[in-house]
Image (cartoon, rainbow, N blue to C red):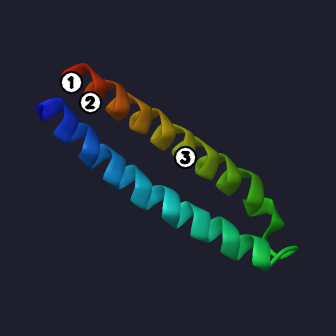
Amino acid sequence: MEQIVKLKEEIKALNSAAISLQNQLHDLAEGLPLHLEELPELARQTFETFSELAAKRQELKSLKSQQV
């Protein structure tokens, strides 16, 4: 049970970070071609954060199914 609580906290933090990065990416895209050089790094960070979030959500789903 403690593992699930910890995982939910990690998911909450990752979700917040992912949304923040998504908003930054959106704002950057709206201003293109200004700051074009920032796009690859911000896109990479956004992709990695959303990928990690998806993995943690899957891990949580697996843990919950094991408890049933």
Quarter of the C terminus within the rendering? top left
Residue 56 appears at what percent x and percent y? 40, 36
Residue, far left? 2
Q: Quadrant of residue 37?
A: bottom right
Q: According to the image, label 3 marks what residue? A: 50
Q: Decide which of tag 1 and tag 3 comes sooner along the chain.
A: 3
Q: According to the image, label 1 marks what residue? A: 68
Q: At 50% across and 56% down in the image, what residue appears?
A: 18
User: Who is closer to the viewer here, 57 or 46?
Assistant: 57
Q: Decide which of tag 3 and tag 2 comes sooner along the chain.
A: 3
Q: Amino acid at mark 3?
A: Phe
Residue 27 appears at what percent x and percent y? 68, 76
Vertical arrangement, residue 7 with respect to residue 68, above or below: below
Q: Amino acid at mark 1?
A: Val
Label 1–label 2 contact, CB within 8 A:
yes
Residue, far top? 66
Q: At 35% across and 47% down in the image, what residue appears?
A: 11
Q: According to the image, label 2 marks what residue? A: 64
Q: At 33% across and 33% down in the image, what residue appears?
A: 60
Which element carries disc 1, helix, strand or loop? loop
Q: Amino acid at mark 2?
A: Lys
Which element carries disc 3, helix, strand or loop? helix
Residue 24 appears at what percent x and percent y? 61, 69
Dot 3 alpha-carbon crowd within 10 angstroms: few under 14, some 14 to 19, many 20 or more? some
Label 1–label 3 contact, CB within 8 A:
no
In the image, which is nearer the foreground, mark 3 or mark 2?
A: 2
Describe residue 11's horizontal placement relative to residue 48 as left or right.
left
Spatial separation of the CA atoms under disc 3 and disc 2: 21 Å
Q: Quadrant of residue 48?
A: top right
Describe residue 27's horizontal placement relative to residue 48 as left or right.
right
Spatial separation of the CA atoms under disc 1 and disc 3: 28 Å
